[in-house]
Image (cartoon, rainbow, N blue to C red):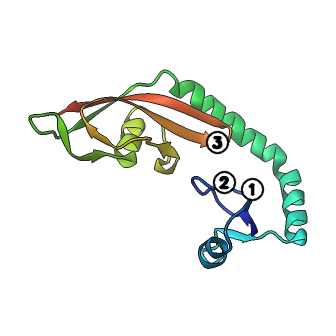
Amino acid sequence: MEIILKEDIQNLGYKDDVVKVKDGYGRNYLIPQKKAVLATPSAKKVLAEDLKQRRHKLEKVKQSAEEIAEKLKDVALTIGAKTSSTGTIFGSVNSIQIAEALDKAGFVIDRKVIAIKEAIKEVGSYKITLKLHREVSVEIPVEVVSE
């Protein structure tokens, strides 16, 4: 089944992408949740016209994402967490804590664009990825220290 995504869905695609999914996933989840529409020939024509009209705006969005990525390349975050005597964190460091640390550093970043590859459950150095745009992402070093 071919569908047109109405929003970014992790591990599937970005807004306005035409993707193939299994019938049940499309019919029972994506379409009822208004995350996608069926990719009929007329819907594809409407999408092409919309993309053509929004191309200039999308270029500005990409350019601003590249500017933010350029500024973020020099940022290194330090996050304090409560730990046991062995260095294991009580709980884990998540995207909300990383977004708050970025906010303190002067960058307002939505927590949904923060991709943590592995769970941060111990004190140490980690790399996180910020997916600012479909074509722009930046890796930031994160140092987790004991409070």
Q: Amino acid at mark 3?
A: His
Which residue is denoted by mark 3 in the rendering?
Answer: 133
Q: Position of residue 33 (x, y in %)?
A: 59, 74
Q: Position of residue 96 (x, y in %)?
A: 37, 48
Q: In the image, what residue occupies the spot 69% across and 63% down?
A: 6
Mark 1 is surrounded, within 10 Å at the Cα level, by few (under 14), some (14 to 19) or many (20 or more) other residues, namely some
**Would residue 120 appear left or right of 27 to someone viewing this image?**
left
Q: Quadrant of residue 1?
A: bottom right
**Would residue 46 appear left or right of 141 to someone viewing this image?**
right
| Identity of the residue furthest to the front in this view | 22
Circle on res. 17:
1
Q: Quadrant of residue 12?
A: bottom right
Which residue is denoted by mark 2 in the rendering?
Answer: 13
Q: Position of residue 109 (x, y in %)?
A: 49, 43
Assign the C terminus to one quadrant of the image: top left
Can you tell which of label 3 and label 1 is closer to the viewer?
A: 1
Tags 1 and 2 touching, CB below 8 Å: yes
Circle 2: element type:
loop
Q: In the image, what residue occupies the spot 66% across and 77% down?
A: 27
Q: Foreground: 134 or 11?
A: 11
Q: Foreground: 124 or 51?
A: 124
Q: Amino acid at mark 1?
A: Asp
Q: Foreground: 119 or 96?
A: 119
